[in-house]
Image (tube, rainbow, N blue to C red):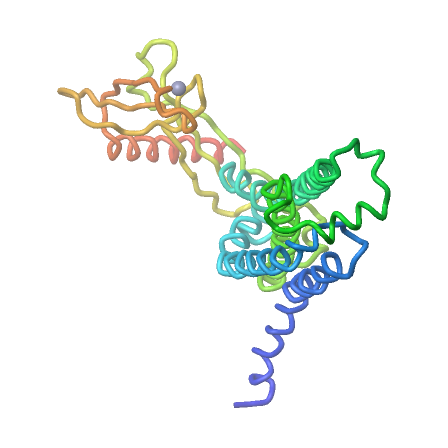
Amino acid sequence: MTRREQKTPVKKFAVFFRSYGIALGVIIGAMPVVTRAGGLLPGYQAVRDTLTFATSLLSLLAIAFLFGFRRHIGEAVFPVKPGSSISREQQKRRTKFGTATPIVLAIVAISGLVIYLVSLNLSIAEVAGANGARIKKESMEQILSGTSFVAIPFLSFICTGYTMMFFGAATAFVWGGLIEYTQGELGITDAQLMARPYVLMSRHDFKVVDDTSLPDSAPFFYFEWDPQSPQPAAHVTGPLCETHKRALKYEGKRGVSEHAWVCVNPDKKNDRHEFTLSHDSVTMQHMARAKADALLGERLRVV
Ligand SMILES: [Zn+2]
């Protein structure tokens, strides 16, 4: 084995630590400073140690869990090599994992901070038994250091706010670090990403001939293809409900050439309606695929 080969795992390890390690370091480093070293974040002395310990433990567990989840994140954010187009499904996942989740985690952290400060404020005022504006700094410090664990008002809100703040911040950091880490693993450069490589595939809606006789809202399919590919293939999705744009689920055979398909609201399972189509899921997929291939062939010949 040559020296260069031996170096590879170490180099990989270094790449990994450049992103993951920085985030982890920031969290572990920042937590005691913010929580223990006094004036930065006021809090009750009686719960301070417990909260610091519990929050660190929870954050570290979340980080470990997220790290096990890293391939899913990478796959969702970088579904294909830059330069080929992505389907609508991939685009949805990319936005969810690449943009929405870090923003949600940051919002959790900020709301945690607000909840913590507001409930701490109310709690001190309640212990002092007075309007917050009349409490002097010395007596506030006395309340924070002298109140026992069981006597703290709004304790559960204080703990929830505190945990949300650090949990949100830690996971947001690591999530961002993992995206960067997988980008490095896949060898995708920032320059490539700045060129906005992930464009949507071309899309064409169609119906399977047999079902055009149905009343107003007949199920439809669509297929997508990558116009940048030298030999584009059709990716078929469907059948979908025309009114709700939701994928239909096959329910089963109802009679001779009568098959039930349902459109279900994923948030409210009772909100559903049924279609009776003349084919089951296997035949339907087969017909849709054949039609999609034919339509795509036609399109490509025209261009
Ligand atoms: Zn529907």
x 58%, y 64%: residue: 185
Q: Residue 257, located in which quarter of the rendered image?
A: top left
Residue 60, percent from left and from top: 57, 61
Q: Is residue 165 above or below residue 122?
A: below
- 3 or 181: nearer the eye? 181
- Residue situated furthest left in the rendering: 256
Residue 211, percent from left and from top: 30, 18
Work out whether residue 102 can be spotted. no
Quarter of the image where ligand 1 sits: top left
- 105 or 193: nearer the eye? 105
x 61%, y 49%: residue: 163
Q: In the visual, does 205 lie left or right of 40?
A: left
Q: Is residue 148 above or below residue 90?
A: below
x 53%, y 61%: residue: 64
x 53%, y 46%: residue: 229
Count of marks placed on residues:
0
Quarter of the image containing the C terminus? top right
Q: Is residue 72 above or below residue 133?
A: below
Residue 259, percent from left and from top: 21, 23
- Residue situated furthest top in the rendering: 215
Q: In the visual, does 230 lie left or right of 217?
A: right
Work out whether residue 175 can be spotted. yes
Q: Residue 155, located in which quarter of the rendered image?
A: top right
Q: In the visual, does 156 lie left or right of 254?
A: right
- 288 or 123: nearer the eye? 123
Q: Residue 15, located in which quarter of the rendered image?
A: bottom right
Residue 148, percent from left and from top: 64, 51
